[in-house]
Amino acid sequence: MTVNPADDLIQTRASRDLSFLDLVSIDQVTDKDFSLIMDVARAFRRHGTYKFDFNKGLSLMNAFFESSTRTMASFDLCAKQLSMDTSNLSSSSSSTTKGESYLDTALTLDSYNLKIITVRTREAGVPEFLARHVNAGIISAGDGWHEHPTQGLLDALTMLDHFKSTTLEGRTVTIVGDILHSRVFGSLVRLLKKLKATVRVAAPETLLPVGVENFGLTVYHDADAAITGADVVYALRVQEERGAAGFIPTLREYSKMYGISKRRLDLAKPDAILMHPGPVRRDIDVHSALVAVDERSHILQQVENGAAVRKALLWLMTSRLNGKKKEIVRK
Amino acid sequence: MTVNPADDLIQTRASRDLSFLDLVSIDQVTDKDFSLIMDVARAFRRHGTYKFDFNKGLSLMNAFFESSTRTMASFDLCAKQLSMDTSNLSSSSSSTTKGESYLDTALTLDSYNLKIITVRTREAGVPEFLARHVNAGIISAGDGWHEHPTQGLLDALTMLDHFKSTTLEGRTVTIVGDILHSRVFGSLVRLLKKLKATVRVAAPETLLPVGVENFGLTVYHDADAAITGADVVYALRVQEERGAAGFIPTLREYSKMYGISKRRLDLAKPDAILMHPGPVRRDIDVHSALVAVDERSHILQQVENGAAVRKALLWLMTSRLNGKKKEIVRK
Amino acid sequence: MTVNPADDLIQTRASRDLSFLDLVSIDQVTDKDFSLIMDVARAFRRHGTYKFDFNKGLSLMNAFFESSTRTMASFDLCAKQLSMDTSNLSSSSSSTTKGESYLDTALTLDSYNLKIITVRTREAGVPEFLARHVNAGIISAGDGWHEHPTQGLLDALTMLDHFKSTTLEGRTVTIVGDILHSRVFGSLVRLLKKLKATVRVAAPETLLPVGVENFGLTVYHDADAAITGADVVYALRVQEERGAAGFIPTLREYSKMYGISKRRLDLAKPDAILMHPGPVRRDIDVHSALVAVDERSHILQQVENGAAVRKALLWLMTSRLNGKKKEIVRK
């Protein structure tokens, strides 16, 4: 018996609604929200690129004031697969270059009666600020070094599926690399703590934010020690474009100290997985022999899960079943 | 009783056709055209982002040789909401950088059997020139300092709706700011004269084109005097990217002399409205306390009306009911 | 009796399949493939921009690591006219600027479950390399100075239609201009040989690749002699952006020696046609009086045929009727 994809989604959802109307931080995601998103994302994943009618007549704008290939393309295609009309605004074409404020750009977009605006900015806090002032639902697609909530959710989905579990209790996740400049870290660590994982970070002192231990994690400077016995090895990219290269002696030395090689990955548990948010810098962050070849690598699975999570959010955020309206402040 | 949106549009149109096949200047818009566009735009506005099947199987290209966030996104989403297939060509990616002429780029696009090409250029007159040589309908999305006809139409819709009238007879519209570099002014003043408004402009001598009084308007250098008793205060942006800053002493002084503050707006009539074509430069063109907060500001209403006017044009220009074919010249 | 467009396509196809799953070189195109593509392209051309449901639920990404207005827009609109969801990745926004390899960008895109990825790169061989490693079908949209297979196919369609024939046996095709830097030449010459045409090239010694005569053609340095008695005069663009200007004394002299003027074209056979892959540099490659005016010019017909050929490929490559699955290698 084949199941109609739309029916599968509707049954999986089971009349549940999210508690939030904008998603700018993992802190907004309640336990109920989280399990709803995971369930619905898995259902979307079952149906690949099947075109759903759910969001027909609704429009989405990707407002990327900082460019990002993969995230913009992912939101764009996900929205289209839900029958949304989409348009993309990228940094170079934006009116902000004519002296317009983020707020006015967002208010203008909002006047097109959009349902969702995804926002990426170089500065932390902009998506949250905009969310208070526009009618459209705002989804942060990354703000400064702060958060990237859909990345956190897809990472959680990837881990939970691998371990066939609903929590990460008893699991150790080791995050290696440029913690300081990483918005991915900001969302990931919040979610890992929520899921009760033990978190270790391994980085040179210069690539760690002040007070990082307040998240309730253990800091290592020795990558081998940090990875030994881990269930998940999560490598981050050295963000040279955000100035990371100034914080380390050379990329060669960094790679030797913190890059994930086969030898280093073998220190983790036998069923451990390797993750990376992409774009990967081969042989600096992660050795070429691991990225797409080693079966422990879940890097491409993360990308696929990203599409599933984003479709889940686009559907759930736009099709509220039980009331709750957004209140905004004009400024 | 709910009305089917498509039926509402068709009834509103009532078998009327536009007189033009390309829209490059407000001078082409007859009185009949104008009332048809206003009626149909209001009908589209009633139905928000509802997806109509009207233009299914028709394609549109946004050929923006000069970049413009808001106008391109507006045409793009409007076309999609009519089920058109759209593609965007922006200045940076254009073959004109490989030495191709505007004409050949347009002829090439035309060979894709597009129905509409929107054109924005730095140079005045290009849309009109292209319209004579391609089969697709050309809509000017702004050419140099000349015209921006869809902006003029959306401005007219905004004013007429506020005053619940079909003309602006007896109304005074004061346009303040950088008249010289403004394509918006070019379309607006033509339409205001057509609608019988009394027009005042307020700008420093250096930001006024030679012979501006030939439009049949009164020139002021004192913004307060120009705004006193006005029904509409229409602020324009200082177009620094077109060199405006070289024409005024400092932005600070400009703002003090011509920026719209609450005190200055209070000089207008009690039911006056404030307008601006965007992007707004807060605290230079218009004070922050007015832009999105003051109820006299119709700036965001203009954006929404822009979508309505553009959908009306895209539908009316592509679905001719009573014959009339375009004749073109090959060059 | 009107024929339903979808039925027309299906009847024209007659249960035939292509032999290839990726298209990166004309060398892959068998005689059967070729006649299938020609037949289906003509059928698509009969129906203009009609929107087919054939590829609904399938997604395409244009991954253009080198920018190209016309080719990207053509693939984009063609895919949409088959109801595909499309997204565009252009050089400036790509993660390759963050140090990601072409391979990882392609693997990432592949994880979105795309059906087709079109690839354009500055470097020769990249599409072929990627084709071996991703699940999506790869269509080369031009790689370095190597090949541009869809251009070759649309050129063949244009010639065969003009001569109402299935081969070019007994026909002489003269290719004039910058052979060295031309990817168009690479695909064109392979196809011309396959179709049994006699091929002449006319170019200054500096704009000819070493060993070009190995393709089985005659080299001329005198354009008049090369064009005399030709059935097709195919002009190429001087690719200044790839450094061609360094190989010739001046553009003025080049134009005098190799530009196609009316006088020069008159040396060809009376029913000869003029072709150019675009973008044309008027009065350097081809005289203005010929480009869009002279009835021998088929330059715009080439563009229209490009859409037809691309739709044929997008449909045939994504809808395999008789099995055959892609095998990929992870790297």
Image (spheres, coloured by chain):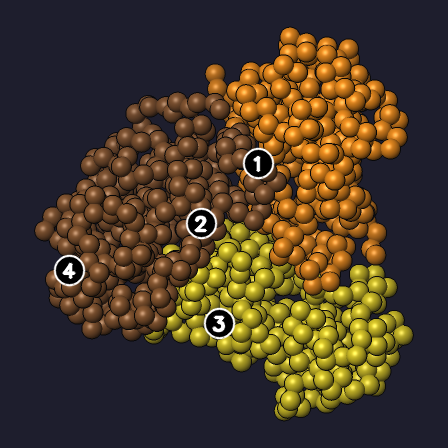
Chain colours: A yellow, B brown, C orange
Q: Nearer the viewer, mark 1 or mark 2?
A: 1
Q: Residue under label 3, please give it.
A: A127
Q: Amino acid at mark 3?
A: Pro
Alpha carbons under labels 3 and 1: distance apart: 41 Å
Q: Secondary structure at mark 2?
A: helix
The percent coordinates of residue B92 (x first, y second) are: 56, 49
Q: Residue under label 1, please give it.
A: B100
Q: Amino acid at mark 2?
A: Met
Q: Secondary structure at mark 4?
A: loop
- Which residue is at 81% across, 82% downward? A223
Same chain for the residues under marks 1 and 2 in the image: yes
Q: Quadrant of residue A175?
A: bottom right
Circles 3 and 1 in contact, beta carbons < 8 Å: no
Same chain for the residues under marks 4 and 2 in the image: yes
Instruction: Please tell me how crowded label 2 is: few (under 14), some (14-19), or many (20+) other residues with Cα within 10 Å.
Output: many
Q: Nearer the viewer, mark 2 or mark 3?
A: 2
Q: Nearer the viewer, residue A91 or A64?
A: A91
Q: Residue under label 2, please give it.
A: B72
Q: Amino acid at mark 1?
A: Glu
Q: Secondary structure at mark 3?
A: helix
What's the chain of the residue with tag 4? B
With respect to residue B280, does B92 lie above or below?
A: above
Alpha carbons under labels 4 and 3: distance apart: 38 Å
In primary-sequence order, the first of circles 4 and 2 is 2
Same chain for the residues under marks 3 and 1 in the image: no
In primary-sequence order, the first of circles 1 and 4 is 1
As drawn, the label of residue B230 is 4
What's the chain of the residue with tag 3? A
- Which residue is at 53% across, 80% downward? A27
The percent coordinates of residue C130 (x first, y second) are: 78, 48
